[in-house]
Amino acid sequence: MTLTNADIVDLTEFRHALHRRPEVSGHEVETARSIAAAVALWGPTEVLTGLGGHGVAAVYDSGKPGPVVMIRSELDALPILELGEVPHRSEIPGKGHLCGHDGHSTILLGLARVLSRRPPGKGRVVLMFQPAEEDGSGAAAVIADPTFARIAPDWALSLHNMPGIALRQAWLAPGAANCASLGLKIRLTGATAHASLPETGRAPTPALARLIDGLRAMGPGGAMEPGFRLATITHLRMGEPAFGIAPGEAELWVTLRGISDGDLDSLLEQAQTLARTEAALAGLTAAFEIHDHFQACVNDPDATAVLGRALEATGIAYDAGDLPMRGSEDFGRFGSAGARSAMVLLGSGADHPALHTQNYDFPDVLIAQGVALFDQAIRELLG
């Protein structure tokens, strides 16, 4: 079952409409409303809304026993000003669909059309439009939602478009696919003093300097192999912007990542221990906040094989490419929740603007490719 030319025109127009009105993580109110209304036109058994915030799930139930296959997309955009010249560029200042989530969700809407014309032979298909992927909170919120237990998947499949990979090519491999990561805020607190008498206060300056070097040493990066860890200092602030005050507090932001959840947990523990040690030596206190926590994304071998056969059937060449990637992806939590899960990176063009850049735009040619890919995987699993 394939999309018609009229389907492609409608879906492309819908994608462009989403692109014009981007909403960032946790604020996908209108995006979710338009998705729910659009998918309801194509015969789902039920449409669930408000999952984990603004998530939407369209369920296609065959009425026969069988597994639950979830296909996931994302709803949120980025807090980045779009500078591209496409006619459908963002109308919201400082926000843009510069990662392709508008395209991924449009693929699922195309899949809804196919499912309405040929429902699954057994089991259920769940089209999951997930909120808040970009900050790593959405999948956890969806899974924690009591409604999710009704549609908990046995299989979870997804794709992400990837600039730098040629069209009709893809990256796919079992095992580690995306790093686990989190943002750690470290706040050091001492006491201010007059700048002429710094010794009478407790400034965080020496501790901050040692902390920067220590964090970089414990997360040096390197080859993407077991044990990979990376600590990236992203923001520093110390004291007030004044020449007459020796600072009494400082804040350091660091992004920690590891190729596995265990590597990330170990790096986090070491980072916090280092901060406490340096703070104690300098007579300071140390406090922590954790943000944007992504679990590792690991491709299950069986789910990877299903996607591999679907790629072959749809004429898309694939290999392992540069997997695993340093970047993180919120999809990994569905695998941790018990689903056999896998994500494929679908080429958006060797010279296409990179993700999260101000002139990126999702290639509409991928809509039909994505629908065909997922349709093939569903037919293998559910008939």
Image: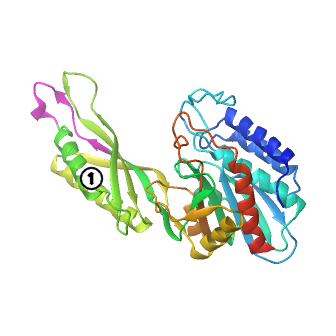
Q: Is residue 68 left or right of residue 213?
A: right
Residue at point 10% right, 24% down?
196
On whether residue 197 falls in the magenta region, the answer is yes
Q: Is residue 284 left or right of residue 224?
A: left
- Of the 4 image quadrants, the one containing the N terminus is bottom right
The image shows residue 311, relative to residue 330, as above or below, that is below
The image shows residue 17, relative to residue 170, as above or below, that is above
Q: Residue 7: x, y in percent? A: 84, 47
Q: Residue 41: x, y in percent? A: 88, 49
Q: Which residue is mark 1?
A: 215
Question: Magenta part of the protein: which range?
Answer: 187-201
Q: Residue 289: x, y in percent? A: 40, 49
The image shows residue 125, relative to residue 95, as above or below, that is below
Residue at point 68% right, 62% down?
315
Q: Nearer the viewer, residue 127 or 299?
A: 299
Q: Nearer the viewer, residue 286 or 264?
A: 264
**Residue 85, located in which quarter of the rendered image?**
top right
- Element class at badge 1: helix
On whether residue 358 falls in the magenta region, the answer is no
User: Few, some or many C-alpha atoms within 10 Å of disc 1 (few <14, some 14-19, many ≥20)?
Assistant: many
Colour setting: rainbow
- Of the 4 image quadrants, the one containing the C terminus is bottom right
The image shows residue 300, relative to residue 116, as above or below, that is below
Q: Is residue 294 visible?
A: yes
Q: Is residue 52 visible?
A: no
